Image: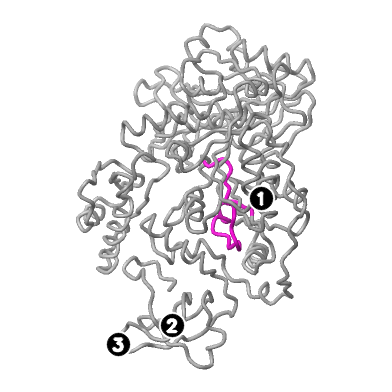
Amino acid sequence: MDVGLAHLDRPFDYLVPAELDEVAVPGTRVKVRFAGQLVDGWLLARADDSGHTGRLAYLEKVVSPEPVLAPEIARLARAVADRYAGSLADVLRLAVPPRHARVEKEPRDDQPTAAPTEAVDPRGWRDYPTGPALLRALADGRAPRAVWSALPGEDWTARYADAVAATVAGGRGAVVVVPDARDLDRLDAALTGVLGPGRHVSLSAALGPARRYRAFLAARRGQVPVVIGTRAAMFAPVRRLGLVAIWDDGDDLHSEPRAPYPHARDVLLTRVHLAEAGALVGGYARTAEAQLLVETGWAREVVADRATVRARVPAIAPTGDDPQLARDPGAATARLPSLAWTAARDAIRQDLPVLVQVPRRGYLPSISCAECRTPARCAHCAGPLALPSAGGTPACRWCARVAAAYACPECGGRRLRAAVTGARRTAEELGRAFPGVTVRTSGREEVLTDVPGGAALVVATPGAEPVAEGGYGTVLLLDSWALLTRADLRAGEEALRRWLAAAALARPAPAGRVVVVADGALAPVQALLRWDAGWFAGRELAERRELGFPPAVRMASVTGAAEAVADLLAAARLPADAEVLGPVPAEEGRERMLVRVPRARAGALAEALHSAAGVRAARKAADPVRLQVDPLSLF
């Protein structure tokens, strides 16, 4: 039943009336009476008898005879619910899009598209010694598992298209998940070029109800062997699944914000176990989770040798951070140290574009007192103040109240300075530093897909960097401290991921240069200079093992009102070796407790928390508690 209450997270038996016998097949949507109300449900299976000794009610209605819930997806949903201490109903809401009756009634063609007969050309993978073997294994119908570190300048969409085509040639299907719509459009074009039109569909929540449901039905009916998409595609019902692939698994867009908060990577790896399929986890960077797959022998790494890396990597140089910037006269112009300014000037003189990555959007998204450097905060809600433009008035980023008469509570000063400089302010400064040069911005308001290859300054926030025709002459990575000093377990990993993604857009050396405004001795900067994401991921994983953080352990967060959190943990029969940490303050006056167990006890932890949530739901406890297993952020 489509009821997300934890204490009702189990199947219920109903009788099927004779008039519904033909249409009531497993996988269909149904209506049933439960506790006096008509509720939605799923018909999971038919049986000749029931273990229930009491009186059984009848199904009220079969909503649609279309069996949209495939048996393998029902098993997957149950496994994901158990993994994340959630309910099956919540997972099924994520797995199956809402019904669109008009789309179901459209003329259908259940004839599957023909698989390509031509062998996949492995030359695109020749820079990776184990790459061609990966394609051969997929084409032979085997189930290889790989973690791929892409070279700079690599057309990753073409490589994924090769892997998918090899899988389809072997008579099996594939699911590929990417972070956002830009990546999806690029992969869609690459697959169309390799497979031909009509052999795959795209699944994304942004498609709209009709288009999304039409694509879903095409996959469920077996009309196409390949589904690509954003995280909405992680549950796509592909027949004879032979490959699941995810690009850039460290991107937080892969984490579902709705209960039970599954991560696309973990859902896809669960499908690997259930379907005995192959797996491809790729990116310019590598997460600690992907490194764990390699170190445990579950997957093999697909990487280029060091000679190939050196030939493909642009010239990367660090500058110092704040102390050196203070001594550098070049920092007075456009917030750039002289090395970065010179690299940008040289690229523009050669009629090449320059990419400037700025961690924050806006004009001055964070300001402080010019006298004592105390962060400027709202007098009403204590939120951070920001300046929207050069002549703008400070306003709160939380409650939007204007602080026209701001005075520092520490020293009484009224002058403000930039604590963090946003993309729009950076573009303004660069326009003054390089008069006559076109300045483009790419960020939340407008994300550019690509830009011409001529001289221009492109200011972008992380993840919004457009591709330049022929590659960028110079890539500048500014304000590194804003990424590296975040109070987050993944701060270094995330900084490196964003830097590598931007640096990969530069031309190879000697034409391409990358300047990172950071201390070259820092580990993430060292990994960038060497283009060695595997080394940094191994270092991160070793540190997390030592400190007892995911993925070396399994950790759950319990967030809510203090009394509700205490109530749930008191009802939970936690494993004997569970360690409870906290409480720590959470948003909106709530608190958070963390529960840590060895990975081998992950199932017991999830079951204990889910059972405790069921106890509270049965008691109709008023204050909700949010359960998250291995949340992206622990702080």
**Label 1 belongs to which residue?**
139
Q: Which residue is nearer to you in this view: 421 or 116?
A: 116
Give the number of the disc on residue 54. Answer: 3
Residue at figure coordinates x 39%, y 23% from the top left: 374
Q: Nearer the viewer, mark 1 or mark 3?
A: 1
SS for dot 1: helix
SS for dot 2: loop
**Label 2 belongs to which residue?**
47
- In this rendering, is residue 572 above or below 430? below
Give coordinates of residue 421: x percent, y percent.
54, 26
Magenta range: 228-249
Give the number of the disc on residue 129. Answer: none
Q: Which residue is nearer to you in this view: 345 or 372?
A: 345
User: Dot 1: few (<14), some (14–19), or many (≥20) neighbours within 10 Å?
Assistant: many
User: Dot 3: few (<14), some (14–19), or many (≥20) neighbours within 10 Å?
Assistant: few
Amino acid carrying label 2: it is Ala
Residue at far front of view: 140
Distance from Cα at disc 3 to Cα at disc 2: 16 Å
User: Dot 2: few (<14), some (14–19), or many (≥20) neighbours within 10 Å?
Assistant: few
Going from N to C along the chain, the mark reached first, 2 or 1, is 2
Amino acid carrying label 1: it is Ala
